[in-house]
Amino acid sequence: MTYQVQIKVMPLKDLLDPQGKAVMSGLHQLEISGVQDVRVGKHIILSIEAADATAAETIAQQAAQQLLANPVMEFFEVSVSA
Amino acid sequence: MTYQVQIKVMPLKDLLDPQGKAVMSGLHQLEISGVQDVRVGKHIILSIEAADATAAETIAQQAAQQLLANPVMEFFEVSVSA
């Protein structure tokens, strides 16, 4: 079966996020107010052929740890849907 | 109240996604198998001060339409959590 796995890779909370700061100043220029903080990360969708959701999640975890996220600067979250 | 709004910005399904193709080949080199397709987009988290969730979502929709997503190449999804 094919599972859609969503991986969210975000900069660690303690780190500066220059891309987020750039978005903040863009929002100010557009006069969109109320936004207090912006964090910008990556969203990756994998289509994984696997026997069950657990197997698909294991593959996605491997992909995130070994390739997609840099643990020094980023954390990731994996969620699976059928 | 402050709401956390998640915005997912992804390349349109009909478009090629070169970053996704690069991830695919990286996964092959790492011998992680089972992945059939990869799409890479952006994940943006906004902290929005607003009266209610609907107001926060409206601000996030504006931000996505006017700044974060390029409608020619990308679509976006907004979800609000308290």
Image (tube, coloured by chain):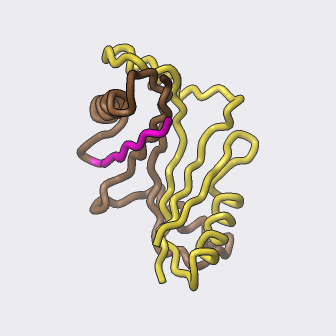
Chain colours: A yellow, B brown
Residue A5 position in % (x across, y down): 52, 65
The residue positioned 35% from the left and 53% from the top of the image is B11
Q: Is residue B17 magenta?
A: no
In the displayed structure, does residue A4 sit left or right of residue B32? left
Q: Which residues are magenta?
A: B73-82
Q: Residue furthest left?
A: B72
The residue positioned 64% from the left and 59% from the top of the image is A64
Numbered label tally: 0
Quadrant in the rendering for residue B26 = bottom right
The residue positioned 30% from the left and 31% from the top of the image is B58
Quadrant in the rendering for residue B61 = top left
Q: Up-down: is B4 above or below B77?
A: above
Q: Up-down: is A76 above or below A80?
A: above
Residue B67 in view (yes/no): no
Q: Up-down: is A57 above or below B55?
A: below
Residue A2 in view (yes/no): yes
In the displayed structure, does residue B80 sit left or right of residue B33? left
Residue B78 position in % (x across, y down): 37, 43
Q: Main secondary structure of the magenta part?
A: strand
Residue A47 position in % (x across, y down): 47, 71
The residue positioned 24% from the left and 45% from the top of the image is B72
* Front in this rendered view, residue A73 or A75: A75
Q: Up-down: is B44 above or below A4?
A: above
* Front in this rendered view, residue B28 or A37: A37
